[in-house]
Image (cartoon, rainbow, N blue to C red):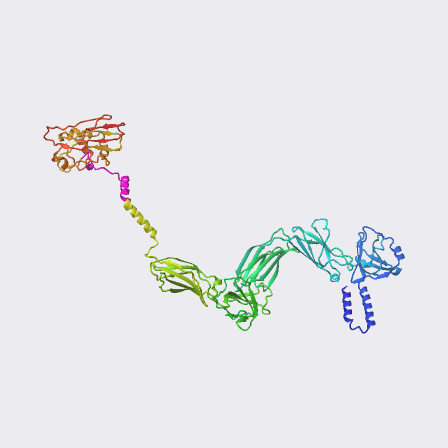
Amino acid sequence: MVGCGLKLDFLELKCSSCASHSPLFILGLILAYYTTVSSHFHTPSVKCKSMSISSTYQHCGLQPDGVHDLDCFGEHTIRNVKTCVWRPGKQTSEKTYTLIIQQYPKRRLYCRAYQDITKLSAEIEVFENYNMSIQVFENSESRNCTRAVFRGSPNSLLRCAPPYNVNFRRQSGKLSVNVSWQKKDTKAIEFYSVRYKALGSLLWNEPPVQSQNRQSCTVENLNSSLVYIVQIQCVTNLKCSQCPWSETYTVPSELTTQPVVFNLEDTDIVEEKGKRLLSLKWKFSAKEMYDGYNVTVGKASGEHLDWIDAIRPEIRLILSYSSYHLNISAFNNASISPAVRLIIPQREDIPDIADERLNVTVHSNTSFTVSWKDDLIKTYVCYAAEWRRKGHKTEYKSFYQNENNYGNVSPLQEPLEPYKRYSITLHTRPEKETCNLKYINNSESTYGTTQFYFIEGSPVSAPTNISSFNVTLNSVVLQWSSIPEDDLRGFLLGYIIHYTEYNLRGTSTERNITVDPKFDTYELEDLKKGTTYQVQISGFTQAGAGVRSTTYFFKTNQEYVDGNRTGVITIFVVVAAVMIFGSTIIKRAKVLLWPSIPNPGNSSAMQKVDRPCEVELLECINTLKVEEWDTNSLQLVEKEAVVLPNRLPSVLPLLHNSEDEEDSLEMTSNWFQRDSEDATGDILPDENTYNVRQTNFQTSPFAFSSEYTTMEMLQQVIPQASPANTAVTQAVESDPEDTQGTELRSTLDYVRQFSTSPTLGSEEMATIL
């Protein structure tokens, strides 16, 4: 077929030169035709007659296990040549075939025999407008000879072959089919049909889906999780009277899940400055039928895009510090999964505006020059500049430079805007043949980054959130929030603090202080104590100072107050409380910690004798009742009485207790405590009140040995008490005829004490008159 095409083309090329020799040209066409026809036949044919065929092959019959499925067809490009194909029988291993064709053009028999055929096909010459009968004999000389028969009209045997290339794409329950036909059939085919069935099913869908054109067809309402079997055939027409189904294609299920990246490492390459190693690892659902992964890597500027096929779920790339877009998706022969999209940001920890290696000179809004410090032209001649505004798409420009340390970037697709900050990065590329990227991986390195303005202006806003702390007598620390970058309209060179004393007259002089732009706090010093100040802060660029902030007020301290003010107040409160309630607290503590021992000298029952004097006696002690061991009360009742000194020994023994001497001290202390809350409020009379005659007390047989009344004294003057459960009453009357005694007037009527004695085991009352 190829040879035929070449010969015909050759003749067509020579036709113009042969136009003047028409007979020769026609003869050449005839020769070319027969040469073309003869080139299809590899087996020679011989004439035959109907009678000889019947006699020679009469023993060959139609057998199920013999030669079968004989089919003949032709092409619309060659009308008089057909191809016949068949399938062999099962009787012998070595087979030879004989093909005989019979036609009756103009009522005459046309019979040709093709013998000794060893293949399962043969090309034959026929008359196009006449019906034909074709027979194939297998092992015609053998007794086991079999045959197959085919009859038809050559005009209806024009066959168009199935497509030689088919592509499937599945997405959202749809199957897109794209086909490519053989060149000889492309113009003859107008539409094609697609039939399908689920894997494992016996029935095809009915009716088949017809395409919109000869190339594409869409099948809808498919189950995304099922695998389908698909066949394709052309739609018959005059040029394609036969359209056989293609071989079966297996279309895998639709990929509906996206890969999941679980490891991303971005590290610098120490050996090569300006480059980084990007390592990614991901995973994909094991249930999905996939063949591999598609990885697309492109620069954020849109300069280049690479497609990388990966078998394993990992990839390693050597990239510059530029920004990249990266997509990863799984694929099979019919589907591509949703892609996981990653943005690899530009590295910000590279030389910034303070780096003097890179500089930008703006000439106009569509032109600028980027220059570098190092002599890069010795190593590189290809460069790429990338610049962008914050929040806008990155733009790029590559250029060639082998003479100077600068490059002009002009013209710009998008003009530069005034008062807007731009960031620019310069990349160097190792490929000297071309400055355009051929591939992404290991294609360039970053030299440096800087920032620039087309036109600078002063800030349109001021610092905010002004506050103060650490206020002292003459200083304060101010703090504020920086001006937003979009409001700076230039490179911030610093802050100006405007402050003055606040008063209603407004005659104070304003003072200004400049602060470095890196700081957001500053300490004002040399202030007046107890003074209110007003503050405003503004930023300034190369174009001048910007607007001022709202006024902020603060006041310095009047007196120095340290950080322990709370402690001082607390101590003051404690001292005041002690001074107010100290006496009561001390008395309470003394009672609890140091029990008071009564002073007999302060008792109205006993009188201290520290000089020679007459003993003052109690004229009458009415009642003494002891109910409890512990003394609860002591009552003193005043009554006038006359006590004679010489009768004192007879009275005092009544106060003597029968207890042991070991208990005498304690009991005496309890018995003679005076009730400080005596209702009468009377006190013992002094010497001036009662005209007491003093005698030499030391010569008296009842003189006390010390200034305190002890149990020894009581045992001397008080007689033994009566036994338990006995009431003793004794009256002492004064003797008017006794000239040796001195009459004493006493206000004491009686001493009564209630006590419960564990030794007595019962209540005892002692009454002394």
Q: Quadrant of residue 100?
A: bottom right
Q: In the image, 232: left or right of 583? A: right
Q: Is residue 601 magenta?
A: yes
Where does the image place residue 759, in percent across and percent down from the top left? 26, 29
Between 695 and 403, the one nearer to me in the picture:
695
Taking 606 as reference, is 514 above or below it?
below
Classify residue 356 as left or right of residue 167: left
Say if 167 sits above or below 717 in the image. below
In the picture as drawn, the residue positioned furthest to the right comes out as 51
Q: Is residue 501 magenta?
A: no
Q: In this view, does 326 lie to the left or right of 32?
A: left
Whole-percent x, y for residue 373 in the image: 50, 70
* Image quarter (top left, top right, bottom left or bottom right) of the N terminus: bottom right
Asked if residue 691 is positioned above or below residue 515 in the image, the reply reads: above
Residue 193 sits in quarter: bottom right
Report if residue 611 is visible in the image: yes
Q: Where is residue 111 in the image (x, y as percent from the top left)?
A: 86, 59
Q: What stretch is highlighted in magenta?
A: 581-606
Return the residue found at the far top. Answer: 726
Q: Residue at x 27, y 42 (%)?
A: 584
**Residue 557 at x, y = what percent?**
34, 57
In the rendered image, which quarter contains the C terminus? top left
In this view, the residue in front, 37 or 686, is 686
Outermost residue to the front? 505
Picture mark count:
0
**Residue 53's quadrant in the figure?**
bottom right
Q: Report the front residue among 40 and 243.
A: 243
**In the rendered image, is residue 378 in sight?**
no
